[in-house]
């Protein structure tokens, strides 16, 4: 029964339950185990999906930037970019998850289309992410461009980032590495498992969360915790409402569906892996949307930019089904924009659809949820308790994940925060 008093409530005062085993949940767990203040064996990661990383954390582009962000997010963005580089340097990131510096390029068919744009345009009209960031002002030089990219005679191709300010990873491989790391440190993964209700002690203080595992909805387990963390991406509002049904607070996060196509670079030379260079290409409207191309190490080309706010978020990530029409549109675009090698057909490695959590402001939420917003539930004081949330990163979830995980771990442990997140609080 909800609210049931359980013997475990008084025992593990500093247990942490993280709901969501995607990139941000994993980064939070990773940095909690780095600090030395939280016992890894007291941390539990819970995820409802039968297959991990089947949504944005595994199917996203993996483009990283140091400075493509509004002032409210710039501190978090810069911290994250540095942490990505630090992790890659310390753990062979180039080999393990394809970390590489990247050159950003704007490709436009006329001189005006590379200028302007806004978040609303990007969400509703498919404008490129470079325009969303208002970071597509050229450096005043023409780009030679990657050999796989076709350019028309009238097209303008210009460099829009350089000097180590953008990079590229394979987010799936990065998440798999994080998962192995936190498991080696002693963190417990519960998956597939769904959080169904919270447990409170006799004083109404949060002391656990109840989860159901596998197909048996009647079989429930109680995980003791005084610190509960919601890092469930686009599913975060649903989880909060389930666990705190009496709360009148609203988590202002919605979902943006994005289709993607992963293809083999027909010009890739495996023997030149050490010389391989990554590019990010942001193009103006082609075949009804603004394509975004990301060249990854190992001869992979990731094509995206076909987004929709009209595709309903499924209950579980593995229920996602890509639209054949959208995938066909991406394939048509790929054939039109790639310079193919004679005698080589386009090799499709993966077709994808993922849901990114977005906010109307464009700012993510990285925050402790005040007790007064929990609908009558209280939490322990002085850093030993609380409900926390990190969601709504939009297109920048992969880029901002390490910084978000670090500052969230600092919030949870009551330590000094490494980035300015004042503007990222849960709105009143």
Image (tube, rainbow, N blue to C red):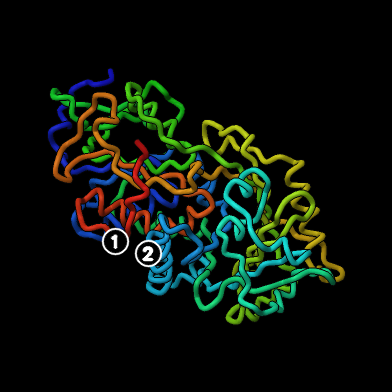
- Left or right: residue 312 versus residue 144 is left
Mark 1 vs 2: CB contact within 8 A: yes
Measuring 38% from the left and 61% from the top, which residue is drawn there?
75
Instruction: Specify whether residue 183 is in view.
Output: no
- Could you say which disc has been placed on residue 79 in the image? 2
Relative height, residue 107 to residue 257 (above, below): below
* Mark 1 or mark 2, earlier in chain: 2
Measuring 75% from the left and 67% from the top, which residue is drawn there?
111
Question: Which sits in the foreground, 156 or 344?
Answer: 156
The residue lying furthest to the top in this view is 1
- Could you say which disc has been placed on residue 393 in the image? none
Measuring 72% from the left and 56% from the top, which residue is drawn there?
348
Quarter in which the N terminus is drawn: top left
**Secondary structure under badge 2?**
helix
Q: Position of residue 393 (x, y in %)?
A: 47, 49
Q: Position of residue 382 (x, y in %)?
A: 14, 44
The picture quadrant where one finds residue 250 is top left
């Amino acid at each position: 029964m909800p609210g049931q008093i359980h013997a475990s409530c008084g025992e593990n005062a500093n247990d942490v339950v993280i709901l969501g085993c995607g990139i941000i949940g994993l980064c939070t767990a990773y940095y909690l185990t780095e600090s030395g203040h939280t016992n890894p064996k007291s941390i539990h990661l819970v995820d409802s999906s039968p297959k991990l990383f089947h949504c944005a954390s595994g199917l996203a582009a993996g483009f990283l930037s140091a400075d493509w962000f509004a002032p409210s997010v710039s501190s978090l963005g810069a911290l994250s970019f540095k942490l990505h580089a630090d992790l890659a340097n310390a753990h062979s990131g180039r080999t393990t998850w394809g970390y590489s510096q990247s050159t950003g390029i704007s490709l436009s068919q006329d001189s005006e289309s590379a200028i302007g744009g806004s978040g609303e345009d990007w969400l509703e009209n498919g404008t490129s992410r470079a325009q969303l960031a208002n970071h597509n002002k050229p450096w005043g030089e023409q780009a030679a461009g990657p050999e796989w990219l076709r350019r028309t005679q009238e097209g303008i191709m210009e460099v829009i980032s350089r000097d180590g300010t953008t990079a590229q990873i394979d987010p799936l491989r990065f998440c798999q590495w994080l998962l192995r790391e936190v498991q080696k440190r002693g963190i417990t993964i519960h998956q597939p498992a769904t959080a169904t209700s919270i447990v409170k002690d006799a004083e109404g203080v949060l002391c656990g969360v109840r989860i159901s595992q596998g197909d048996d909805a009647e079989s429930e387990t109680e995980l003791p915790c005084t610190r509960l963390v919601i890092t469930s991406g686009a599913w975060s509002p649903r989880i909060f409402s389930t666990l705190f049904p009496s709360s009148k607070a609203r988590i202002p996060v919605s979902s943006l569906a994005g289709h993607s196509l992963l293809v083999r670079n027909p010009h890739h030379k495996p023997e030149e892996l050490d010389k391989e260079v990554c590019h990010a290409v942001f193009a103006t409207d082609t075949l009804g949307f603004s394509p975004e191309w990301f060249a990854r190490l190992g001869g992979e080309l990731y094509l995206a930019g076909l987004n929709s706010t009209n595709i309903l978020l499924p209950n579980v990530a593995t229920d996602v089904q890509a639209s054949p029409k959208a995938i066909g549109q991406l394939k048509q675009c790929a054939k039109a924009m790639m310079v193919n090698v004679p005698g080589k057909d386009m090799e499709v490695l993966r077709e994808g659809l993922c849901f990114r959590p977005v906010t109307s402001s464009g700012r993510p939420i990285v925050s402790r949820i005040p007790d007064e917003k929990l609908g009558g539930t209280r939490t322990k004081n002085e850093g030993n308790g609380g409900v926390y949330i990190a969601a709504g990163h939009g297109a920048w979830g992969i880029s901002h994940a390490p910084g978000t995980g670090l500052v969230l771990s600092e919030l949870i442990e009551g330590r000094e925060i490494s980035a300015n997140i004042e503007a990222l609080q849960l709105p009143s």
